[in-house]
Image (spheres, rainbow, N blue to C red):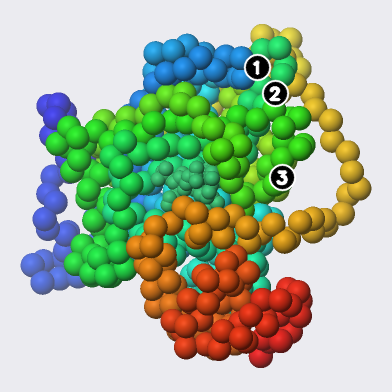
Amino acid sequence: MKKDEKKLTTNFGKPVENDQNTVTAGSYGPALIQDIHLLEKLAHFDRERIPERVVHAKGAGAHGYFEVTADVTKYTKAKFLNKIGKRTDVFVRFSTVGGERGSADAERDPRGFAVKFYTEDGNYDMVGNNTPVFFIRDPLKFPDFIHTQKRNPATNLKDADMFWDFLSLTPESIHQVTILFSDRGTPRTYRHMNGYSSHTFKWYNDKGDYFWVQYHFKTEQGIQNLTLQESTKLKGENPDHATRDLHQAIEQDEYPSWKVEVQIITPAQAKDYRFDPFDITKVWFHADFPPITIGRMVLNRNPNNYFAEVEQAAFSPANFVPGIAASPDKLLQGRLFSYHDTHRHRLGPNYHLIPINQPKGAKMVNYQRDGFMRTDDNSGGAPNYYPNSFGGPEPQPDAGEPAFEVSGMADRHPYIHPNDDFFQAGELYRRVMTDEDRDHLIGNITSHLCNAQKRIQLRQTAIFYKADPEYGGRVAKGLGLDVKEVERLAKMSQDERAKATAK
Ligand code: NDP
């Protein structure tokens, strides 16, 4: 600590003479409003909490770097990826999704996996999860979905009816539900899980050719998960276990790392693929498009201050750099708006000036001015309009995404192939899971779904049955449901099933 940092002051630098005794009229007298230091201290304390994130409220973060290990210049002109051995600083935040800021780290929930790359062309954010897919694929459903993961508006309790009612009426969720209720829904720590972009993104090179890409961050600590019993115990005994684990590992110089892989497909391959390559409820099978290793990410520095660096960190999937752009994935298109918007609400319109969110390798120069908490020099006397003839910043045409064609009838289009929704979840159950994984999956589901009304249990179990009859049959047995009734419901259309199980 520097010498002048040892002197206590008010927020405006006035030396404070006493920090233990309020100014009062006599020893027993009332406090005087002229005790400016007391007023300032209480007023600031009253405003310490900012709105918590509406999702991903509980999290932990760390600094580190990303290093390129393969030549990908034929796919993308992104500068931070243009040379083997090149390192870029990153800040990463892991989180749970549905719980409040004080909730337990061991909750069954997807885990957020957000990476901010501080590149020379500005910040690039990869705002992913520890799952390669998601529950829904249309942003119009997002607020409803999140409501069902949070508290019942009447009781303020988590509610199994809300949770399963929505999911069973939204069958495209089955793939993500199967992953969530496997032991991967309760990762042992943030270090022992993978991260996935889940969405498809566009990479384009300096010739203007483009490719579709998905990212996979594979943990080098190995995948480790908690069983239902372990997570239940941890939630009570050590609710911050994953936050503590990340901090301690880095303190002890055990730096967690991830191998970074991408799956890349051409526009022609995307057109012919058996699944919609932009449907976030699906993966691209590894056998069809083997992942390529392109880099490695290491986390090697803890934040100095949690609020400044983790709570105020603001990630957005709309933070692209030249060489990387959005795909037509509808959920991604909704997120392109929603993340910046929620940060403006939570942190204010100038949240990009908070040090953790500022670009490091590039300078922010534009014509935006003013607003709450404008903490820089607000561009001084430089022109605040464009075009101008006073030497203000100029657009850089090279930085743009190559033009691309779009066509089609504007309408609220439903998804075209709803029958595909069950196959990949079935493949996970049949082909990928071990006997032990399947046993745990059934136990994890039945211990949660048993709390919902029977008609909702039947509807959801029919969805499991559609993914795989054995899967649905085992859940039915675990819940004491009639398998024949589940089979009958599984054969109905979605609308018929919803009618047959309505209240
Ligand atoms: P593979 O059969 O080639 O490999 C299986 C994949 O499943 C591995 O990536 C493995 O991850 C992952 N996995 C293992 N157990 C679980 C689990 N309980 N929950 C979620 N993922 C798990 O994969 P395919 O490409 O042929 O896809 C088959 C199924 O695997 C998919 O339907 C999907 O459910 C799942 N999967 C596929 C991914 C993809 O991008 N293709 C990514 C992740 C899962 P790891 O190697 O890290 O242990």
How packed mark 3 is, by other alpha carbons closer than 10 Å (few <14, some 14-19, many 20 or more), is: few
Element on which disc 1 rests: loop
Q: Determine contact: label 1, label 2, CB under 8 Å.
A: yes
Question: Which residue, given by chain and number where applicable, does mark 2 sit on?
Answer: 210
- Which residue is pictured at 73% across the width and 60% down the height? 418
Cβ of mark 2 under 8 A from ligand 1? no
Element on which disc 2 rests: strand
How packed mark 2 is, by other alpha carbons closer than 10 Å (few <14, some 14-19, many 20 or more), is: many
Give the CA separation, mark 2 to mark 3. Answer: 20 Å
Question: Which residue, given by chain and number where applicable, does mark 3 sit on?
Answer: 274
Q: Which mark is residue 141?
A: none
Can see residue 317? no
Closer to the N terminus: mark 1 or mark 2?
1
Whole-percent x, y for residue 227 in the image: 30, 64
> What amino acid type should be assigned to the residue bearing mark 3?
Arg
Closer to the N terminus: mark 3 or mark 1?
1
Give the CA separation, mark 3 to mark 1. Answer: 26 Å
Whole-percent x, y for residue 354 in the image: 43, 35
